[in-house]
Image: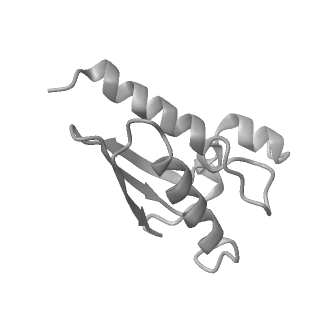
Amino acid sequence: MKNEKEFLGIEARIVEVLKNIYDPEIPVNLYDLGLIYEINVEEDNIVHITMTLTAPNCPMADYLVSEVDQKVKEIEGVKDLDLKLTFDPPWDKSMLSEEAALALGLL
């Protein structure tokens, strides 16, 4: 069994990658926008991510999902990715990090 430190290392690298993927329409990364609902790393390094978009009809949906899929799969140690897009619960501004809210002029 792999130790917790190794799992956290992979998860930390995933978060770092997600913080470098930006919605082209909003100058804030996906992670700080609150679009990532869950990241789970299994023992065999298969990653499960549940994410959403700011709106179901987001014109950048295909781009953002593809970017997350590609970038996470490129992370050393990630064997595979199961990426789930959901709209339940729907995204709202309360999911923004403090940094994102500040960048968007909401604080």
Is residue 88 toward the left or the right of residue 52 in the image? left
5 or 99, which is in the foreground?
5
Q: Which residue is drawn at 55% across and 65% down?
A: 65
**Does 54 sit above or below residue 20?**
below
The image position of residue 96, as x and y in percent, is 64, 46
**Which quadrant of the figure contains the N terminus?**
top left
| Colour mode of the rendering | one colour
50 or 78, which is in the foreground?
78
**Which quadrant of the figure contains the C terminus?**
top right
Is residue 13 toward the left or the right of residue 26 in the image? left
Q: Can you tell which quarter of the image residue 32 is in? A: top right
Q: Which residue is drawn at 46% across and 50% down?
A: 73
The image position of residue 40, as x and y in percent, is 33, 44
Is residue 39 toward the left or the right of residue 104 in the image? left
The image position of residue 34, as x and y in percent, is 58, 49
The image position of residue 76, as x and y in percent, is 45, 36
Q: Can you tell which quarter of the image residue 83 is in? A: bottom left
Toward the right, the furthest residue is 105
**Does 92 sit above or below residue 103?**
below
Q: Which residue is drawn at 69% across and 71% down?
A: 60
Q: Residue at x 69, y 47 (%)?
A: 29
Toward the bottom, the furthest residue is 57
**Does 38 sit above or below residue 99?**
below
Question: How many numbered marks are there?
Answer: 0
39 or 17, which is in the foreground?
17
Is residue 69 toward the left or the right of residue 27 in the image? left
